[in-house]
Amino acid sequence: MKSLFLYLSLFFKQHRDLYYKKLNEIRKTGDWEDWLNFFLECVAVTATDAKNTLLKIKKIFEADDDRVASIGRAHESAEAVLAEFKQKPLLTITEITKQIGFAKTTAIGAVNCLINLGIIKNISEKKWGQIYSYAKYINPSIPNEE
């Protein structure tokens, strides 16, 4: 991840009635302190959620790195492909070959290795141009398959 963001708008959406009530109070009474307390609570809750999500992702990355490291001689190409999925969690074989510079057969072998380890999966129905997903990274609440 190159940059981290706090998704404050989700908190505001989840607490929409209170959000508008606090804004109206500013307009009616000028009570900025109550609004600022609400906003700071939003930042604190959102920051905690972001931290917890990042810790889950870190654990997923570490567990998957360990699984790939244990596979023997194919681990180098699988590690390179996994690193690519960490940058972009939805990839095709063509994208992998362009990004890493692997031959198509090497990329396919590494992808199949990651599939067999339960790290990525094919999410497309088509025969050509298949899309592979690092689903646990996209949605860290998916349990690690071991």
Image (tube, rainbow, N blue to C red):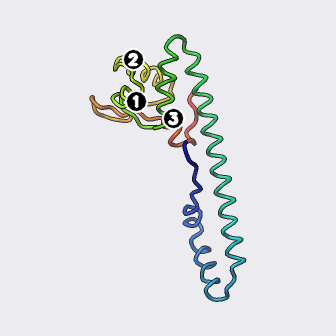
**Residue at 58 percent of width and 18 percent of height:** 69
Report the label total.
Answer: 3
Q: Are marks 2 and 3 in contact (CB under 8 Å)?
A: no
Q: Which comes sooner in the sequence, label 2 or label 3?
A: 3
Q: In this figure, which residue is indicated by the disc labeled 2?
A: 106
Q: Which of the 4 quarters of the picture holds residue 130?
A: top left
Mark 1 residue type: Gln
Mark 2 residue type: Thr
Q: Which of the 4 quarters of the picture holds residue 70?
A: top right
**Residue at 63 percent of width and 78 percent of height:** 22
Q: In this figure, which residue is indicated by the disc labeled 3?
A: 86
Q: Is residue 63 above or below residue 90?
A: above
Indicate the quadrant containing the N terminus: top left, top right, bottom left or bottom right.
Answer: top right
Q: Which comes sooner in the sequence, label 2 or label 1?
A: 1
Q: Compute the Cα span from label 1 to label 3.
A: 13 Å
Dot 2, how many residues are within 10 Å of its Cα: few (below 14), some (14-19), or many (20+)? Answer: some
Q: Nearer the viewer, mark 2 or mark 1?
A: 1
Q: Position of residue 54 (x, y in %)?
A: 62, 43
Local secondary structure at mark 3: helix
Q: In this figure, which residue is indicated by the disc labeled 1?
A: 99
**Residue at 40 percent of width and 32 percent of height:** 132
Dot 1, how many residues are within 10 Å of its Cα: few (below 14), some (14-19), or many (20+)? Answer: few
Q: Is residue 100 above or below residue 76?
A: below
Q: Is residue 124 above or below residue 17?
A: above
Q: Compute the Cα span from label 2 to label 1.
A: 13 Å
**Residue at 53 percent of width and 37 percent of height:** 136
Q: Which comes sooner in the sequence, label 1 or label 3?
A: 3
Local secondary structure at mark 1: helix
Identify the mark at residue 2; answer none if there is no mark. none
Q: Which of the 4 quarters of the picture holds residue 32?
A: bottom right
Mark 3 residue type: Lys
